[in-house]
Amino acid sequence: RKVTISVIKADIGSIAGHHKVHPDTMAAAARVLAEAKRKGVIIDFYVTHVGDDLQLIMTHRKGVDSPEIHELAWNAFKKAAEVAKELGLYAAGQDLLSDAFSGNIRGLGPGVAEMEIVERPSEPIVIFMADKTEPGAFNLPLFRAFADPFTTAGLVIDPRMHDGFRFQILDLYEGRMIELNAPEEMYDILALIGDPTRYVIKRIFRKTDGEIAAVVSSERLNLIAGRYVGKDDPVAIARVQHGFPALGEILEPFAFPHLVPGWMRGSHWGPLMPVGLRDARCTRFDGPPRVIALGFQVTKGRLIGPVDLFEDVAFDETRRLAQQIAEYMRRHGPFMPHRLHAEEMEYTTLPDVLKKLEGRWKKVEGPEAREIGKRERKESAEVQE
Ligand code: 13P
Ligand code: 13P
Ligand code: MG
Ligand code: MG
Ligand code: MG
């Protein structure tokens, strides 16, 4: 019998800036889900947050992209946003880009990761939830967990994993998708996902039998809204053990606090810091970007757990290194590569600032023009003749 795990998240407002979800908004969302559980619409649920992002973790029998489940999530966010507005929370309703629900929550602002599975006799899963970053943040850790034998011993040792995994990758700029196999096409996979602002791992399947192993939310709020409305703080679901990476193999890549796009105003590279729920909030320069990992057993659709996996001394050194990297990056101030590249900045408020300078550019003439005029650049169109 199949069960669907749906993780749907949205920033519906937060307390004292983009810091943290207010408990009353979580309670409002939980009441909506509790009612749905009582009515049998969902089997089980867990409400949590990372930073200013409200997370709805649900299990049910209705499959992925179920209008009923998406509407339920939408209603839970609406109720939570009402509380946020009443409390005057910051950016209340931030990620709810539409006023009306229209059958599917995708494209309306909230992030969605869902998988339908046949439960194994024991079905351990891990849900990763990050704030102040975007879906491509999971490219590096997921590649390492599912394709790097130096991370995942099971790729070498376990016959069920030895054939490797298939990666479904989205091109967020062109709206297209490709499937590539590891290990055979590993270098092609890396050629794409090494640019996490454009290419995003969406799903991972086990090659021996096509079983789904992981799924990532892929909302790009800026690209949907056409303007900066906060970062697309992502979530991912991964199945672990027994033919999938062991728990410790899926967590292992997060021991390296790699640089991800996001952080302050969604405009800076910073280290992804793994934290427990207690530290699932954003402070320094609105960060640094954080990720939590909650482990559950899915048992006849029930969510047994969670366990707070990064709330552990084993990640203390990672957090310390993340702090050092944060300090190093921060000292660059507004300079790249701390600041994101121009293409990503297009969706921030920076273009408005640059617009003011438009009339002030002058053409370089004389001998100096020969020094600089050699390269055709997009910006040259803005030079006043
Ligand atoms: P146990 O023998 O403790 O079940 O561990 C198996 C395993 O996969 C460890 O990575
Ligand atoms: P969020 O996407 O988490 O709301 O962050 C917005 C922001 O601008 C932080 O500086
Ligand atoms: Mg916010
Ligand atoms: Mg956020
Ligand atoms: Mg956001």
Image: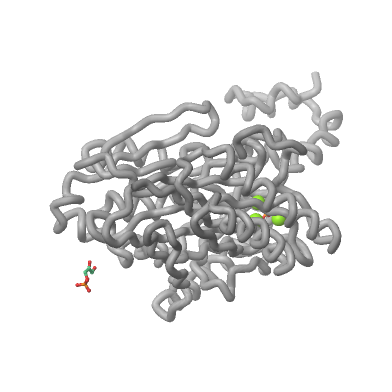
Name the residue: 71% across, 61% down.
28
The image quarter containing residue 240 is bottom left
Where residue 64 appears, as percent x and y from the top left, is: 47, 40
Front residue (pair 282, 57): 57
Spot the residue most to the bottom. Answer: 313
Where residue 372 appears, as percent x and y from the top left, is: 63, 29
Q: Exactly how many numbered labels are in the figure?
A: 0
Front residue (pair 316, 322): 316
Q: Can see residue 133?
A: no
Q: Can see residue 123?
A: yes
Where residue 223 appears, as percent x and y from the top left, is: 64, 34
Front residue (pair 295, 332): 295
The image quarter containing residue 13 is bottom right
Q: Indicate left or right for 164 with 264 as reference.
A: left
Q: Looking at the rendering, in which quadrant would you find the C terminus?
A: top right
Q: Indicate left or right for 270 with 310 as reference.
A: right
Name the residue: 63% across, 50% down.
339
Above or below, 59 against 167 in this view is below
Quadrant containing ligand 3: bottom right
Task: Name the image colouring.
Answer: one colour
Where residue 384 appears, as percent x and y from the top left, is: 80, 22
Q: Indicate left or right for 80 with 256 as reference.
A: right
Q: Indicate left or right for 82 with 161 as reference.
A: right
Name the residue: 42% across, 57% down.
301
Name the residue: 65% across, 51% down.
10
Spot the residue most to the front. Answer: 39
Above or below, 18 against 202 in this view is below
Front residue (pair 204, 284): 204
